[in-house]
Amino acid sequence: MNWLFFLHLSGIALPHLSILPPDLATSLVCDFMQVFFHIGASFQTPELFGLPHPIKDMENSIKNAAVGLIDNSIGDKQMDSFRKVLSLSGSGDNAMSWNTFWTVVNKVVQIVKPFGFALVTTYFLVYMFDAASKEQLTFESIVKVLIQLVIVIGVIANMEKIVNAILSFSESIFVKVSANKSGDMTTSVDAKSIVDDMVAGGSVFSAWSSALFVWIIHQLAVIALDFAAIVRMIELGWRIALMPVGVANCFEGGVSSPAIKYVKSLFAVALSGAVLYIIGLTGFSIVGSFLSEANDFFGLLLAQSALLGTAGAAIMASNKVKDITA
C-alpha cells in the first residue's frame, strides 16, 4: 500500500522534474524514495526507529479506559450522596443544606393557613347542617364535634411544632440507622484482570464496550437511587406545605377521617428516609456478596443487576411505608 502510494506521488511529481538539471532531478528522486521508504518502514516496525507503536498505544489506551470504567462501577461511594439527600438536618459534612427548600415550604404554609381555617369552618357548618337535616343533633354529638373543631384549629395553628416533632423523630431514626454503616460494603475487584480476560476472549473494542455497558447500568442505578431520595424530599415538602388544607376535614370518619389519613401519610413519608437508607445498605451489601462469588465480567453484570433491583425497591419504598401506616 505504501509503495502504491509512492508510485502515485511519483507519477505526479516526476514529470515536473524535467525542467530541472539532470543531476539535481536524480538527487531529488533518490531522496524522495529514501524518505518514503523510511516512512513506510516506520509504520510497519516503529520500534526499529525508536518510535512508539501507534496501534499498540491505541489498544493500551482503550484497555486503560475499560479498566477505569469498571473501577468506577465498583464501590459504595455513591451511598454518601444518597445519605446527604436523605438527611433532613442540613448540618454536618454528610448532609445537604435544605435552607432554601424549607424557606419556600414555610412561605407556602403561611399562604395556605388562612385557606385551612376557612375550610375548617366550611366542613364544620356542612357537618352541622347535615346532622340537623337527619335529626341527629344531640347534646353529645354537639360536644363531640366542638371538641373536633378545637383540635383541628389547634393543629393548624401549631402545625410548625407538630411538623418539627414528626421530622425530628424520623431524623433521629435515620441517624441511628445510618450510623451503623462501617467500611466499604462491596468487594474490590481486579479490573485489569477482568479486562485482560475479555480481550483474550474477544477484542479490545469488545472489552471496552462491555465495560461501558456495566458502567451505564451502574450509573442508571445510582441515578434511580438519588431520584427516589429527591422524590421523597419533594413529597415531604408539598405535604407539609398543604397540611393546613389536608387536615381541615376531621369531622367525618372518626380515626379514618381525611385529616388523620393526611397526618399518617406525612409521617410515613418522613419515616421513609430511614427505610430508603436501609434498602441502600442492603443493596450494596448484596452487590459485594455477588462480586466475592464471581470476580469476573458476569459477576459484574450480576452485581449491577442487584443494584438496579435496589433502586427499584427504593422507588417503591414510600408507597409501601404508607401502606403500613394506613
Image: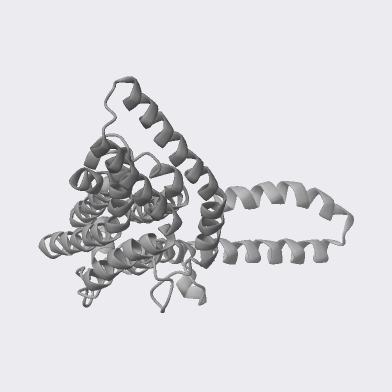
Q: Where 103 falls versus 255 (above or below)?
A: below
* Residue 285 screen position, x and y as percent: 17, 64
- In the image, farthest residue toward the left: 293
Residue at the spot 36% in from the left edge and 62% down from the top edge:
86
Does residue 196 appear left or right of residue 31 in this picture? Answer: left
Whether residue 228 is visible: yes
Residue at the spot 41% in from the left edge and 78% down from the top edge:
93
* Residue 70 screen position, x and y as percent: 32, 62
| Quadrant in the picture for the C terminus | top left
Nearer to the camera, 175 or 250 = 250
Q: Count how many numbered circles sit on residues in the image.
A: 0
- In the image, farthest residue toward the front: 139
Q: Where 181 falls versus 269 (above or below)?
A: below
* Residue 8 screen position, x and y as percent: 67, 46
Whether residue 72 is visible: no
Does residue 102 appear left or right of residue 250 in this picture? Answer: right
Nearer to the camera, 281 or 67 = 281
Report the colour scheme: one colour
- Where residue 120 sits, quadrant-wise, is top left
Nearer to the camera, 257 or 28 = 257
Does residue 53 appear left or right of residue 83 in this picture? Answer: right
Residue at the spot 50% in from the left edge and 62% down from the top edge:
102
Residue at the spot 19% in from the left edge and 60% down from the top edge:
287
Nearer to the camera, 95 or 261 = 261
* Residue 144 screen position, x and y as percent: 27, 42
Q: Where 297 falls versus 91 (above or below)?
A: above
